Amino acid sequence: MPTMKRFKTDYVGVYYIKGTAIANGKPEKIFYITYRRNGKLVEEKAGRQFSDATTPAKASRIRAERIEGKSLSNKARREEKARQKAIKEWTIKRIWEEYKSTHPLTKGIKSDDGRFKLHIEPTLGDKKFEEVAPLDLDRLRINLLRKKSPQTVKHVIGIIKRISNFAANKRLCRGLDFKPTSPKVNNLKTEFLSEEQVMILLDVIDKDPHPYAGSMMKMALYTGMRRGELFRLHWTDIDFERGFVKIRYPKGGVDQIIPLNDATRTVLKLLPRTGSDFVFPGRAGGQRTDINHQINVIKERAGLPKDFRPLHGLRHHYASMLASSGKVDMYVLQKLLTHKSPIMTQRYAHLRDETLKKASQLAGELVDQIIKKEGKDVVKLETR
């Protein structure tokens, strides 16, 4: 508040102090107004005599506008200006919020949002990508690796890469001008059950009273569908006549179509219809968000290994089963698993290779059997 001598004017709530003009240093009146807003006394500058062309009458009009709420107070204007400036600046936090608003609200987005708020926002949220140096991400990666698994850290770095690309592609701002380093992760765990384990599991499923848990496990076993894909599955996604199932928002992003085999058809035909759009509805017929407790009960009753992940593991079993059969090539398996890239499908290639080796070995044994049956010895041909 001004501490200099105040001079009254003919207008209520308007006074001035004697100051010095900024341009030439000559004496200049500086006008102030006082009024009440929400019961509180407000006192603020209205303008200068020369540089702002302010008069007592003009100051009085400004005061009336403030009282009537037609214009913001000086403080409010400063706050609004700061807010608008912040909006124009695409910070990493703001880019993440924009990214979320353009993507479906799935379990993956919810998980990533938790990782962002916990690991990225505290240190990088208020920064712009042009302010982020390689050392910043190196520190983030190293600090996280001290308390988190390499897979978690890889997810965190992956979020930063994604929103950097998003910002650049949408022309919001410039993204990172370097490639962040991600920790190496050995996540090629391929889960496989024995024939006996599968038989016991199916028997337990048939005896389980839950209306959906066992059926979801069968669907994962018969189709290789992911957990989230089962949660999002609508009845309208099932084409019983043509024999196809539409996969909504698979991990690759674009909707996919997979065949509806007879085993899956039977599972679906036996499911209860509740009027919900979802095949495996949650509360009040909405989209299901969890099934862990129910499927873990089945897993324990079937005596499956503790580290076996019921739905994800059955998807692996489905893929391993097809790969080891020797009847399905890697391209077909990639399409069935809705893998965006063949790289993920390659984890099952060794199963196919083992089958091919066995087939090749069998061919040699069959020839040997023919020769022995004829009572002849194997003749080694010499290369001429």
Image (tube, grey):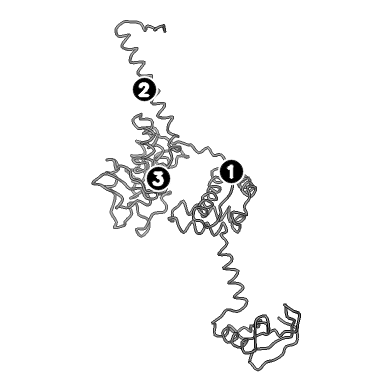
Residue at horizontal 50 percent and vertical 59 percent from the top? 98
Disc nearer the start of the sequence (1/3): 1
Of labels 3 and 2, earlier in sequence is 3
Question: Is 65 in front, or is 147?
Answer: 65
Label 2 Cα crowd, 10 Å radius (few <14 / some 14-19 / many 20+): few
Q: Position of residue 351 (x, y in %)?
A: 41, 30
Q: Amino acid at mark 1?
A: Thr
Image quadrant where residue 363 sits: top left
Describe the element under mark 1 as helix, strand or loop: loop
Which residue appears farthest toward the bottom when viewing the image?
A: 10
Under mark 3, the amino acid is: Arg
Q: How many marks?
A: 3
- Observer-nearest of 58 and 319: 58
Q: Amino acid at mark 2?
A: Ala
User: Looking at the image, is mark 1 or mark 2 earlier in the sequence?
Assistant: 1
Tag 3 secondary structure: loop
Residue 300 visible in image: no
Residues at marks 1 and 3, CA–CA distance in whole angstroms: 29 Å
Q: Which residue is mark 1?
A: 181
Cα distance between the residues tagged 1 and 2: 43 Å
Q: Position of residue 291 (x, y in %)?
A: 41, 50
Report which residue position mark 3 lands on.
Answer: 226
**Is the residue 81 above or below the residue 364 in the image?**
below
**Disc nearest the viewer among 1 and 2:** 1
Quadrant placement of the N terminus: bottom right
Instruction: Specify few, some or many for label 1: CA neighbours under 10 Å numbering under 14, 14-19, or 20 or more.
Output: few
Q: Is 50 on the left or on the right of 283, as rendered?
A: right
Residue hosting label 2: 359
Instruction: Specify the quadrant that holds the C terminus.
Output: top left
**In the rendered view, would you say 77 is above or below 28?**
above
